[in-house]
Amino acid sequence: MSEHPNHQQLIGYIHQTLNDDEREVMDRHLTTCQACRSQLADHDRLQHRIRYELMADLKAIQPPRTTTFDAIAPRLEQRRSLMLRQLAMRITVAVAAAAMLITLAVLANQFQPPATNAIGLALAANRAADFAALGTNPGADGWFLAGSAPQNYESGIDQAVMHDGKSSGYISSTVPSSEGFGTLMQMFKADDYRGKRLRLSAYVKAEHVDDWAGLWMRVDGPASEMAGFDNTQNKPIRGTVDWQPLAIVLDVPQNGAGIAFGVLLQGAGRIWIDNVRFEVVGQNVSTTGKQAEAPTPPMLQPINLGFEAGLKGWSPESTSQDYGIDTDPAVAHSGQAAGHIQSKGAKPLGAGALSQYVKADAYQGKPLRVIGYFKFDSVNATARFTVYAFSPQDTILRSDSQPISSTAVWQRHDIVLYVPENSDRIAYGVILEGAGQVWIDDVQVEAVGSRVLPASVDRTIEPQPANLDFEAGSTGWSAASSDPQEYVTGIDSTVAHLGQASGSIESLVPKPGGLGLLRQTVKAGEYRDKRVRVSGYLKADRLAGGASFLLTIFGQPDQMIYANSRSISGPTDWQRFEIVLNVPANSDRLEYGLAVRGEGQVWIDDVRIEFVGNGVESSSFETSPLQYGFFGASQPDNLDFESSTALQAWFNGGNPDYEVDVDHSVVHSGSASAHIQSKATVSAGSYEVLSQFMRADDYRGKRLRLSSYIKTDQVEGWAGMWMNIADSSNQLLGLDNMQNRPITGTTDWREYETVLDIPENGAMIGFGALLQGKGEIWWDDVQLEVVGADVPTTHPYQQQPLNLDFENSK
Amino acid sequence: MPDINALIERWRADDTHAAEAIYNLYRDSIYRLAYGLLGEPADAEEVTQDALAYALIHIKRYDPRRASFVTWLHTITLSRCRDKRRRRRLSSVPLFTWLESGDDRIDPSSAPEDLANRTDVRSEVWRAVQTLSSPLREAVLLRYWAGHTYREMASILGCPIPTAQSRVRLAYERLRTQLTPDDLAALEEEQAP
């Protein structure tokens, strides 16, 4: 008889974790050994018992009655024409819309240059997404086709149908049913209309429109933020109708930068547009859309939180006349009344909000906890509990919100929001969007000391490094992720390099698109002019993207003067990383920590900052693509892709739908070009970029021309080149992504250019190639040059709206 | 059992009835998994609703070539549970005191069932499972209750396959020492060939 298996082997055998050889040996042994067979039977019985009892136990458990589909149904509305909602979002309470945009901007700010890659682009893409997913050029001067699903639409000039003249523009669905929308649009500079009230009017005719069609107009502020928006969804064009006049009136603010407008078709059908007109109107004509709101004067402290004194201290706000906002004496969580928002009519427009604004003084630099009780009654509306922190300039520094589910009982929600030191006021309240009613009562507002890392934390500057081993919880550290649904950042007391806890970032969703960040900022003080080593330990689990140990140094004011990183790209046990440098004399603060991109969980622990002698060599800059290492080069590099290190200095977005490489068989010149190719399937809206970032120092106040050669094959979405410029806090100052002149289909090598002015406050220039949707793009011989004022810029805004009568076909 | 892939296709084409059917198919099992991992009805309900809402909203992200729908759902559920656990762990004490002081955050209409659940669920195995660390409890539920393969477990847990295997083995060993009378276990150890 062969030797008895040991205990481990038996356990492995019953758990089917032995390899084939081991199992065969065991099988042979068991045929002859009664003792082992009997042991095995015991294990079998126990396994069976565990399985059986677990199943019986859990089978007896039923979800509470409130666990219903109806309770989550409102959330599923999110999915419904997501893109249209983005457009519609813009007409919700300005606060909400602004929060979205500003949150992104704030995040971009925190993620310094690596973010210029992911977040900056996401930001650009987000802005562009309003109308960026470009399809074909409609063949009408000035106009282009965009929307959430441009591939489902075609557009052009129709010489058989017109309201006036000889032709009109049209959009027609090319598929039997379309989930998204297509729009025929233009963008132009606001210069001529600043400080004026502008009326857009047009005639629209429709055939078999199964959802709706209408006009829209948006006014963009200086940082591409929305300063005004309206569409004619309140007078939707449906079915088959003859020429209808439609109009939108918006105020263009003094700092208005651009105006975008167009006609949109949601769902299947065909529409024509003609006689588009812009005219400046007097104040006697009322505006139709939503303008940015004037700030409401804040209370000195929270008052009337139980609504027993009517709406005293609360600000009712709504974007349309379709919401009634008051207290409800018939419903209360406690006391005699609750705050109440009720929509009017079956399809209310926009949103209604009930908020209280309070001076932030008592909460600055602390986590704020706001608790409220809510009751929400609706089938398909959404209600959100929201908390904001505003700067003195009335921008939103921080915000968080929670959806309220529709149930017949009062629900308690609480939000913890870090209130930055520079906050001027906070606001909390409830927003209702759609048909329904929501009540709010018994709000509690308190500053809390907490080990919880708030979902998003503003950068605080520590006088010196603190809590580098995370044993004191989140003290001294701050977190941010581009989308709180994608990453959770916190202190993990189950995993540690040494001690009991570590900092952790974990992705919550498959293939997150953004970044998670955990970092500490300290004054440069004693480190200036010294040689310093910053080290830390990272551990990664199921890491599909990348993670980096980061060090960034800022000068005054807010100028990034050094950045370096050490990156990992797969699961790893605790591993030490270090960066050694001479801290520049003009340093103001040091920032170090962990950034994570893509799926995975990564821990950081036992960070150290120490002085080292001059004998210790300074760290080289990480230049590996795919990671965040390449910061702050002052000159572009490897523009012809001939570098022996493939794609040196270039980053791609790491989108798994695409492959990015160097192609030696297809070149414009030399022996290599850059190549982006989609895989067999590409998820909707997916895109990949190849990017490079450099400091703007040498180009400030100049006009910069980016040119390159591009060849494409079967591009179904669009391909192009992009360049953007951001200031030192990573606010976008300018962007051209060729969205108004996309490359589609199969094209041979051709030179393209984008020309932007680099403002005096420009800090970082990003540029690259991009491919959206399926196809292939080759890119070669990129060139950056300063040009004179005689070379026109390619900013996507035209000087003037063009060809509004569609008489000029190209 | 309706054809889940057909339901998914219909929901992708925006048929709300299909979404509801998918929800109803998986609600109970997701709740049970969450309850098994968290041991608390309110948290389990929240995770269930969040996980199913997430899956339905992001149905386009589900790739049948990568995993079965159940595996995908369990991945989301587990991630939400971990999140919940982490938050619970990190929540400051006052909040808990506050919650335990009899607040009505938990829907009162569901109280009787919860109570029933709590008292019914008292098998020895259950109690032993509750004493396991989170990673081991995850392993037990996914292997013994959900019947996942090690490959699926690795994908759900986000760990290599050998790690999933060793967690199951370790969990089994822990359960065995608890479920087998001490002397007998000791005897077995001694007599192990």
Image (tube, coloured by chain):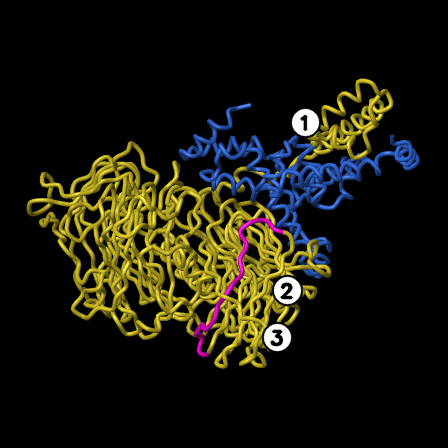
Is residue A360 shown above or below A688? below
Mark 2: few/some/many CA within 10 Å (<14, 14-19, 20+): many
Label ID, residue A474: 2
Q: Position of residue A336 (x, y in %)?
A: 58, 59
Pair 3/2: label in front:
3
Chain in blue, by letter, is B
* Chain A, hue in figure: yellow
Give amino acid for label 3: Val
Pair 1/2: label in front:
1
Q: Quadrant of residue A782 in the image?
A: bottom left
**Badge 1 or badge 2: first in the primary sequence:** 1
Mark 3: few/some/many CA within 10 Å (<14, 14-19, 20+): some
Is the residue at mark 1 from the same chain as the one at mark 2?
Answer: yes
Q: Which residue matches tag 3? A: A612
Q: Position of residue A18 (x, y in %)?
A: 71, 31
* C-alpha span from label 1 to label 3: 54 Å
**Which chain hosts label 1?**
A
Q: Which residue matches tag 1? A: A20
**Badge 3 or badge 2: first in the primary sequence:** 2
Q: Which residues are magenta?
A: A556-572
